[in-house]
Amino acid sequence: MHRKSEIILGIDPGTIVMGYGIVKIEKNKPELLEMGVLKLSKYKDANQRLQIIYNKITELHKAFLPTQFAIEAPFFGKNVQSMLKLGRAQGVAIASAMQHGLSAQEYSPKKIKQSITGNGNASKEQVWKMLQQILKFEDKPEFLDATDAVAVALCHFYQAMQFNTKGIENNNWESFLKNNAHRIKK
């Protein structure tokens, strides 16, 4: 992240419910712009669901002009058919982002949870509660896929901060605390 202001689109892919979150980063401080879900269960045709996912990413791009795109990587489950469907949803989301000039960064569910809560095995509720603290929002969304998507975007920001030392005076705890004051629980 090299500009003063970045907008990160985070996606929690799914073929039944897809979560999305838009986080603005200005002066290294995250701000939640929007989060929500795309409900796909009413559409029976798998190809129609994929088209709707593609269109939603395009719509979000036009509305928010994200500069970064991050997506949760599929985890390995026992159900091969579910994995294939999830992989298609992820691929379509990435293709839509790439169509708009964004490269995709993938993060494992464990990495995202670790980045947000400090615990790679945290529950969806623990992630939501931590995001409430960090981003100062009140309501619990109907589907936690929305907060999962926000977590993906915030994870991307934290990872970029970790590896981008430009603009950070010293690589020590004092400078880390100064640059991450929003993460300190009071």
Image (cartoon, helix red, strand yellow):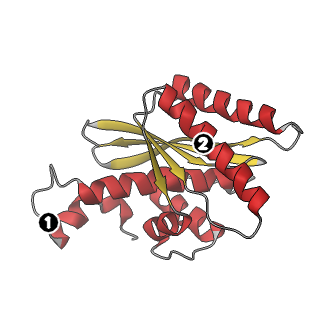
- Residue at label 2? 91
Label 2: element kind: helix
Q: Which residue corresponds to the image point at 42% horizontal and 38% vertical from the top-left?
A: 103
* Foreground disc of the pair 1, 2: 2
Label 1: element kind: loop
Q: Which mark is residue 171?
A: 1
**What percent of the width, then of the height, locates residue 79?**
77, 65
Report crowding for label 1: few under 14, some 14 to 19, many 20 or more residues within 10 A (C-alpha). few
Above or below for 179 versus 44: below
Q: Which residue corresponds to the image point at 75% horizontal and 62% vertical from the top-left?
A: 80
**What percent of the width, then of the height, locates residue 165?**
18, 55
**What percent of the width, then of the height, locates residue 116?**
47, 65
Amino acid type assigned to the residue bearing label 1 in the image? Asn
Report crowding for label 2: few under 14, some 14 to 19, many 20 or more residues within 10 A (C-alpha). some
The answer to whether residue 42 is seen in the rendering is: yes
Which picture quadrant has residue 94?
top right
**What percent of the width, then of the height, locates residue 117?**
48, 71
> Looking at this view, is 161 or 27 the one in front?
161
Number of dots carrying numbers: 2
Q: Which residue corresponds to the image point at 60% horizontal and 42% vertical from the top-left?
A: 91
Above or below for 102 versus 35: above
The quarter of the rendered structure image containing the N terminus is: top left
> Looking at this view, is 178 or 117 the one in front?
117
Q: Which residue corresponds to the image point at 80% horizontal and 32% vertical from the top-left?
A: 48
